[in-house]
Image: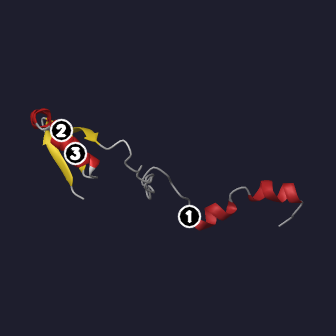
Amino acid sequence: MPTITVNMHEAKTNLSRLVEKAVQGESVVIAKAGKPMVRIIAIDAPVPAKRKRIGFLAGQVIVPDVRTFNDLGRDEIAAMFGGDE
């Protein structure tokens, strides 16, 4: 269902109607000066599942090239397990 966005004045004037729409499952957002401020939802509305945040660390993590990555900790691992490569 599409989200209904109304300004503060309209929300004050039509609160009962907006609450009824929320109870029926519609998404109602109240905005102030065009900026969304609150969402009206029914008390028994199902909690939406959390979305997976794929790529949320893009540009913040540096992944080393394969050769460097494979060499990380090589000496320490060899010392722990007695391997002499």
> What is the x, y in percent for residue 20?
22, 45
Q: Which residue is mark 2?
A: 16
* Picture disc at residue 20: 3
Q: Residue at x 72, y 55 (%)?
A: 73
Please state which of residues 6 and 14 is positioned toward the viewer in this rendering: 14
Residue contact between numbered discs 3 and 2, judged by CB atoms under 8 Å: yes
* Picture disc at residue 65: 1
> What is the x, y in percent for residue 42?
32, 44
Dot 2: what SS? helix
Q: Residue at x 17, y 37 (%)?
A: 15
Badge 2 amino acid: Ser
Q: Residues within 10 Å of mark 2 (few under 14, many from 20)?
A: few
The nearer-to-camera label among 1 and 3 is 3
C-alpha gap between disc 1 and disc 3: 57 Å
C-alpha gap between disc 1 and disc 2: 60 Å
Please identify the quadrant where the C terminus is shown: bottom right
Badge 3 amino acid: Glu
Q: Residues within 10 Å of mark 1 (few under 14, many from 20)?
A: few
